[in-house]
Image: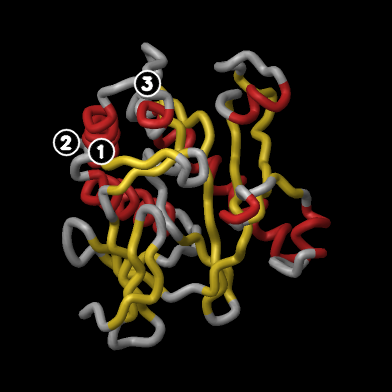
Amino acid sequence: MNKISLIHEGKAKKVWQTEDQDLIIQEFKDDATAFNNKKKGSIADKGVTNNAISCRLFTMLGENGIPTHFVSQPNDRDMLCKSLDIIKVEVVTRNVAAGSLVRRYGFAEGTVLAKPIVELYLKDDDLDDPLMNDEHAVALGVATCEEVASLKELAAKINALLVPWFAERHLRLVDFKLEFGRHKGEILLGDEISPDTCRFWDAESGEKLDKDRFRLDLGGVEDAYSEVKRRVLGL
C-alpha cells in the first residue's frame, strides 16, 4: 500500500491517502509538542517508538473485542489504518490524580481515585481543547447522545483491559487520552496509544515515563519512551 497524497499533517503525525479510499497511512513524526503546541521540540526516534507501542496495543485491544482502525504495520514509522470520520471529542480516562486534575481540583498528585474519572474535551486547538460535558458535545453537533454513551463505554472497556496489562509490565497507567471515529456506521478507536497520549509511572519507583518528562523539562525523555517500548514489546 502506497502513500498517494497528504491528507493532513498534525503535531505528531502525517496522514496519507492510499490507493484504497477506505485505508490511510499514519506516519509518526519525531516532533514533540506540549501545552497545545505552545512548547515545541523533537524527541529522537519518537515516531518509531510510538508506532511500535501503538501497533502492539491496538493489536492486543482488537484481540479482546475492541473495534479499532488498526490494519497493519508496514514499516517502523507507518501504521496502515481504516479511514475514519474523526469525532471531535477527546476522551480522557483518569485512574490516578495528575496533571490538570491536580491543577483544577486540588487533588494531591498520586492520589488513587476511588473509581476512574472519564472526561470529555472538545477537539479544537483554536479553543485550547476545552473540557465539556455530554450536553455540550450534543449541542455542538460533534456527537449524538448515543455516540457519547458509546465513547464512554468503550473508554471504560479499554481502561479495564489496559490497567492490568500494563501492571504486568510494572507500569502504572495514570491517565490517557483516546480518540475515536466513524467508519461505515461503526465507531472505531483511532489515533494512537503511546507515551504521548498516556501518563505512565514506574509501578515501583513512581518515575514518570511519558511526555511529562518533555513538558516539565525533567530530561531523559528518549530513555523514558524507549523503556516503555521495551516493556510493551517484551524486549
Which amino acid does the dot numbered 2 rest on?
A: Leu
Residue 139: which quarter of the image?
A: bottom right
- Residue 95 x, y percent position in the rendering: 58, 30
Q: What number is the disc on residue 229?
A: 1
Residue 49: which quarter of the image?
A: top left
Foreground mark, 1 or 2?
1
- Residue 68 x, y percent position in the rendering: 45, 63
Report, in whole angstroms, how far the alpha carbon at label 1 lies from the one at label 2.
8 Å
Q: Residue at x 49, y 64 (%)?
A: 67
Report, in whole angstroms, how far the alpha carbon at label 1 lies from the one at label 3.
13 Å
149 on left or right of 80:
right
Q: Residue at x 67, y 18 (%)?
A: 107
Q: Residues within 10 Å of mark 3 (few under 14, many from 20)?
A: some
Q: What number is the disc on residue 202?
A: 3
Q: Are marks 2 and 3 in contact (CB under 8 Å)?
A: no
Rendered-image quadrant of the C terminus: top left
26 on left or right of 172:
left
Could you tell which of marks 1 and 3 lies nearer the N-terminus? 3
Q: Is residue 146 above or below residue 129?
A: below
Q: Nearer the viewer, residue 205 or 196?
A: 196
* Residue linked to disc 2: 235
Q: Secondary structure at mark 3?
A: strand
Q: Secondary structure at mark 2?
A: loop
